Image (cartoon, rainbow, N blue to C red):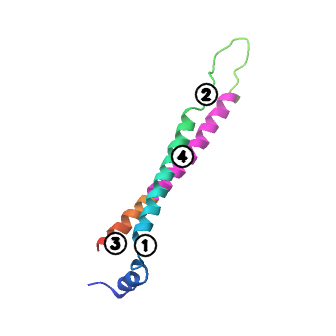
Amino acid sequence: MQSKIHKLFEMKFLKVKGFRFWLHTLLDVTIALSAFIAAWYWFKSSIVETPLLLNNWDQEKSYEGFNFALKQSSALNKTAASWSGLSATLMGIKLVSELFKKS
């Protein structure tokens, strides 16, 4: 037995030819694209050059270059994590829509 709301939803939206197919295709493309962008940002984060901190007795240590590289890498990781989160969220939406399709 289906509820009246479920039947109404089915009649209004799911009866449109190919609606579910296009929705899932759009979700698949967006998931793949956001996962690729996340991977790209993590790759960029991994190749940030970190300067060596050497002990020189005659000069004071400078952490400026190291701090800049650390902040740059951190910002890239944050962006990559955001894209990865978007990908996971969209995959969750797709999985939930698959569950409702079968019920």
Q: Comparing marks 3 and 1, which lies closer to the viewer? A: 1
Q: Mark 1 points at which residue?
A: 19
- In depth, the one of 52 and 94 nearer the eye is 94
Residue 69 left/right relative to 23: right
Viewer-closest of 41 and 69: 41
Instruction: Tell me the chief SS of the magenta region.
Output: helix
Reply above or below: 81 against 44: below
Instruction: Please give the label number shown on residue 50.
Output: 2
Which residue is depicted at the point 49% across and 57% down? 30
Residue 58's label in the rendered image is none
Is the residue 88 above or below the residue 1 in the image? above
What count of labels does the image hold? 4
> Which residue was labeled with disc 3?
100
- As drawn, which residue projects farthest toward the right? 59
Q: Do the residues labelled 2 and 4 touch (CB within 8 Å)?
A: no
Disc 4 marks a residue whose amino acid type is: Ala
Question: Disc 4 designates what residue?
Answer: 80
Disc 4/disc 1 C-alpha distance (Å): 31 Å
Nearer the camera: disc 2 or disc 3: 3
